[in-house]
């Protein structure tokens, strides 16, 4: 009911988010708002808690404290079922692709569809799979196993699997890490295309400056568990703050 | 002298601590495995049922272990017969061969041998598979795409081993008896029909039923241990091999413990 875009002002609304693992206090009061259709790039040092942040957003990690509203739903309060329903509208690309080793590319893409038949009513699974693969330009890989794919192909297939449910929000965990600059740029462009085509909002976690510049309408730097600085890429780039500066050198 | 005594007491104390720690670890692990098994029994009744994955796992388990289980069973049947023949002949009790071999195989050797082989082959496979899925976040990916990974991965695999180990045990029993019959046929001129009718004559339902029941327990134990080890493995690629190894060790040990319990329980029933 309240998944109607009118009833919530922002797709993601995070206030004062805290998350620790034992004595390791990873997130210490993080704030973030993502508007409908907006791409936010999040940068931060390795181990600063970027992956933890988006895992909290999708409910894979429980949060300790704070407010976390995604697509109008209060994530920490959702039942298992409601969480599943929410996840049908959220795409998540894992840092290591996380393709299912024992399944072909086709089966990998069909996997998210099997539990959400009502959402994709009126479409044939086959068509959705083909469309998603065409979007990432890998239709010819449909019957290959993940072990037969290169690193860049894996990232693209993972991207296809992420978008196959036509999510309203997409969370990318380092979509370009470990790729050569050319492939990385292709993937960044693909992310922008997907944003346009599906009208989806997204959070892009990245180390890669080029990726942050191409994909992000806005850039957030995560440091000490807080959003250290926010702004347009060009604005942030010009800042003289030493912490910010260290990302651009 | 005094110093020596002090150090040796200290050493003793340290060793005691090690023993205590091991003991604690043993109880903690046992508790966690029991909880994991309890979760299986809580969740197995409710939909969604992953029948397709269950069938696939059954097929894979059967397919992977059939040749190995068949070969060892065959050899065991032959060896057992060859080894006992001289003694039986000495006592003029050759005609008891089918009964003796039949009971030994059906009651004990078939189930335990098959379970041990499957602990090595299937248990370690499940452990390694789930551990690597965990490390590469495939289990998280399932959860995110709305599939309960416990149902999809654990329940199907444990159910599959529970169904398939008894099937493999029966197969192994038959092949072992076949091997034994071949020896008797070649060396003692006993016909196959005579051999098997003798086996059937001596073998009672009371021999078969407990052995089938305990095979179900063996299958469940192998599946649960493999899944527990894999599903809860700590992150890291080098953990995958260790997980598989531990799964085999624990599952094999558990097979013997369960066998011991099963024999004690059966014994009580016979006395009644
Ligand atoms: N499941 C977990 N259990 C315990 N600690 C964890 C867990 N997940 C993450 N951490 C800790 O949280 C911190 C942040 O981890 P995270 O994976 O979010 O880093 P990251 O910013 O994504 O780094 P990278 O850029 O290297 O991927 C690290 O110190 C890590 O040790
Ligand atoms: Mg990360």
Image (cartoon, rainbow, N blue to C red):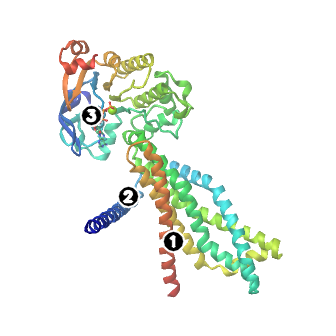
Secondary-structure class at tag 1:
helix
Instruction: Point out the quarter of the image occupied by ligand 2.
Output: top left
For ligand 1, tell me if the residue under mark 3 lies within 8 Å. Answer: yes
Of residue A228 and residue A133, the one placed in the foreground of this image is A228
Which mark, by number, is residue B36? 2
Image spot of residue B149 (x, y percent): 41, 47
Q: Is residue A85 left or right of residue A6?
A: right
Image spot of residue A202 (x, y percent): 31, 25
- The quadrant the C terminus of chain A occupies is top left
Read off the chain for label 3.
A
Of residue A61 and residue B183, the one placed in the foreground of this image is B183
- The quadrant the N terminus of chain A occupies is top left
Q: Nearer the viewer, mark 2 or mark 3?
A: 3
Image spot of residue A26 (x, y percent): 23, 37
In the rendered image, the vertical position of residue A14 relative to residue B185, given as above or below: above
Image spot of residue B102 (x, y percent): 67, 75
Q: Is residue B190 left or right of residue A232?
A: right
Secondary-structure class at tag 2:
helix
Q: Which residue is mark 3?
A: A49
Query: How far apart are the two marked residues, 1 and 2, measured between alpha carbons?
Result: 21 Å
Say if labels 2 and 3 share a chain.
no
Q: Which residue is mark 1?
A: B259
Quadrant hosting residue B96: bottom right
Q: Is residue B49 visible?
A: no
């Amino acid at each position: 009911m309240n998944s109607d875009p009118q009833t919530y002002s922002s797709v993601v609304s995070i206030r004062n988010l805290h998350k620790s693992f034992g004595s390791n206090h990873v997130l210490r009061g993080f704030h973030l708002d993502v508007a409908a259709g907006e791409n936010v790039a999040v940068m931060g040092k390795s181990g600063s808690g970027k992956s933890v942040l988006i895992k909290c957003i999708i409910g894979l990690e429980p949060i300790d404290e704070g407010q976390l509203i995604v697509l109008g739903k209060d994530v920490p309060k959702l039942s298992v079922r409601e969480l599943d329903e929410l996840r049908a509208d959220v795409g998540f690309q894992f840092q290591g692709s996380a393709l299912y080793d024992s399944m072909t590319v086709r089966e990998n893409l069909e996997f998210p569809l099997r539990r959400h038949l009502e959402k994709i009513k009126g479409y044939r699974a086959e068509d959705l799979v083909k469309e998603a693969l065409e979007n990432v330009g890998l239709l010819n890989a449909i019957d290959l196993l993940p072990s037969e794919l290169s690193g860049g192909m894996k990232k693209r297939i993972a991207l296809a699997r992420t978008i196959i449910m036509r999510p309203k929000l997409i969370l990318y965990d380092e979509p370009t890490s470990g790729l050569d600059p050319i492939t990385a740029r292709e993937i960044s462009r693909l992310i922008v295309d997907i944003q346009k085509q599906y009208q989806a909002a997204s959070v892009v976690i990245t180390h890669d400056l080029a990726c942050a510049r191409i994909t992000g309408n806005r850039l957030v730097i995560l440091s000490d568990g807080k959003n250290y600085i926010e702004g347009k890429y060009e604005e942030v780039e010009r800042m003289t703050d030493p912490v910010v500066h260290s990302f651009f050198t | 002298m005094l110093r020596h005594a002090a150090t040796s007491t200290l050493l003793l104390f340290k060793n005691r601590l090690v023993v205590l720690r091991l003991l604690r670890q043993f109880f903690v692990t046992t508790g966690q495995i029991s909880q994991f098994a309890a979760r299986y029994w809580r969740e197995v009744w409710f939909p969604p049922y992953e029948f397709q994955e269950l069938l696939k796992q059954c097929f894979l388990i059967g397919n992977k272990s059939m040749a190995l289980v068949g070969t060892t069973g065959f050899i065991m049947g032959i060896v057992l017969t060859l080894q006992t023949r001289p003694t039986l002949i000495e006592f003029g009790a050759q005609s008891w061969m089918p009964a003796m071999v039949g009971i030994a195989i059906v009651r004990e050797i078939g189930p335990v041998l098959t379970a041990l082989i499957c602990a090595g082959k299937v248990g370690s496979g499940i452990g390694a598979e789930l551990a690597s899925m965990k490390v590469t976040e495939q289990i998280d990916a399932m959860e995110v795409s709305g599939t309960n990974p416990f149902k999809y991965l654990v329940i199907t695999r444990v159910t599959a081993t529970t169904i398939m180990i008894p099937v493999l045990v029966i197969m192994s029993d038959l092949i072992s008896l076949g091997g034994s019959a071949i020896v008797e046929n070649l060396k003692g001129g006993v016909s196959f029909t005579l051999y098997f009718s003798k086996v059937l004559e001596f073998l009672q339902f009371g021999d078969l039923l407990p052995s089938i029941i305990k095979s179900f327990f063996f299958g469940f134990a192998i599946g649960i241990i493999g899944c527990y080890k894999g599903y809860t493995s700590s992150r890291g690629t080098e953990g995958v091999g260790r997980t598989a190894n531990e799964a085999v060790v624990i599952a094999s040990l558990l097979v013997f413990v369960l066998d011991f319990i099963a024999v004690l329980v059966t014994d009580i029933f016979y006395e009644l």
